[in-house]
Image (cartoon, rainbow, N blue to C red):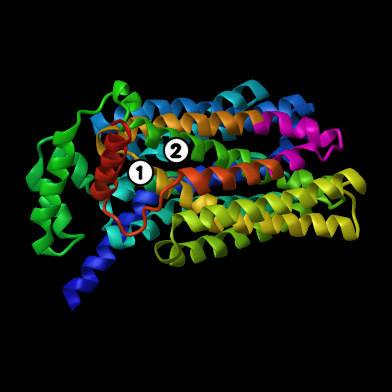
Amino acid sequence: MTSIKKSRRSAGVVYFFGALGALLWGYDNGVIAGAMLFIKKDFDLDPGLVGLVTASITLGAGAGSLLSGALADKLGRKRLILLAAVVFSLGIVAASLAPNPAILILARLVLGLGIGIVAVSIPIYLAELAPAAIRGRVGTLTQLMIASGILLAYIVNYLFSPTGDWRWMIGVAIVPALALLVGVVFLPESPRWLVKHGREDEARTILAMRIPADSVDASVAEIHRTLAASKGSWRDLIQPWVRPAVIVAVLLAIFAQLLGINTIVFYAPTILSAIGFSDQVALLNTIGFGVVSIIFTVIAFRIVDVVGRKKLLTRGSLVMGGSMLVMAIISITFGLTAGLTGYLAVLCLVVFKATYSLTWGTVTRVVQSEILPLTVRGTALGLAEVFNFASTFVLSAVFPMLLAGGTGLPFFVFAIIGIAAFIFVRFFVRESKGLTLEQIEEDLRTRNRDSAR
């Protein structure tokens, strides 16, 4: 019994540090929401520059995800996470010391590189390390860390808001960056990656720590069968049996952003200020958003392997679309002003944030890391993340100008996208709960081999 508890504690530490890079991802996304209230005053930024400074991180993230996708199957998951820790540390120092908007944009591009790397490496690493029975729960750690990072950023923003010291708001992130830099050294490599690169003894040792000893041989044999069936390359992404999974992964990434989440993460204080709240009260309210996100991510952690992926995605898209439709109606009819309609708008944002954390924010990357074949998993997930960050960039750059115009159009568009996301998941996403990665891949092969006949 003692050895089992020790093994579980050891696995928990591995999963924690394996996902820690996502905390920096969340922090660097969330910190700009509060810091921008003071950056735009110091640098006298117009709405266009506000959008560019905010969205520049997503350009770097797109490049980072492409780089990570190309390197994930060559360097391994662990080395990529280590690389991300170094990149994050450099970007944090540069952004906190930026003397002008140009340097700040460049620094946020570097931070984006780190985000792009962890966006690919962490979901793959956790999916390949966790046993099938708890893979969904382990996969939710990515979103839990992102949500925790955003909440930490909101708290730091609020604490420094009386002085308006945005440089310290950004600079605090160096603490978790250094923790990741140290912690990742002690992480094991993915057993599936090790088998692929001829290091089977190491893979067996790691598998024995995660699954019953009498299941190791079968697991290794299953990995070998999967590897023997195909050789990964960019060309494989368009192979008939692989292409459906790649398309689903890409569209999940696009919908996850077009639903509107990052406009709320990046611009929640700006939206609240537009409603009529003071800067400090707006920042305090965003802490509430962060707490809600943590609570519902934890709930998702408990239910994702029980309820299933597909049900959470379909119901979540409808609830989020409904909350954005109410926001659109409020904006068009009464405007985002203080009073009853303002508080109703805040309630809509809370519902949206809670639902996203419970469903799309948590489940999307779990599904992507599960459905993509092993030999192209890194490359395909990198491609999906490029579309993810491209969608984020467009929304983040355009949203402040639309909000400044007082229009409810963006919220109405988000509502329509919610309906489209429901239709997409309902008809094109298959349930993967409880299946091993090898079973999911074999099912993909069988279905598309049969359909090609």
The residue closer to the viewer here, 14 or 107, is 14
Q: Nearer the viewer, residue 79 or 137?
A: 137
User: Which sits earlier in the primary sequence, circle 1 or circle 2?
Assistant: 2
Residue 89 visible? The answer is no
Q: Which mark is residue 248?
A: 2
The residue shown at (77%, 56%) is: 346
Tell whether 186 sits left or right of 325.
Answer: left
Q: Compute the Cα span from label 1 to label 2.
A: 9 Å
- Look at the image and give the residue range highlighted in magenta: 395-414
Q: Amino acid at mark 2?
A: Val
Which of the pair 335/99 is nearer the observer? 335
Categorize mark 1 by other alpha carbons within 10 Å: few (<14), some (14-19), many (20+): many
Badge 1 vs badge 2, beta-carbon distance below 8 Å: yes
- Is residue 401 within the magenta segment? yes
User: x%, y% of residue 139?
Assistant: 39, 53
Residue lying at 52% horizontally and 49% vertically, measured from the top left: 426
At horizontal 82% and vertical 59% (from top left) the residue drawn is 344
Q: Residues within 10 Å of mark 2 (few under 14, many from 20)?
A: many
Q: On screen, 118 above or below 153?
A: above
SS assignment at label 1: helix
Where residue 453 appears, as percent x and y from the top left, is: 28, 31
Residue furthest to the front in view is 453
| x and y percentages locating residue 214 in the rendered image | 9, 63
The disc at residue 371 is 1
The disc at residue 46 is: none
Towards the viewer: 174 or 412: 412
Residue 445 in view in this figure: yes
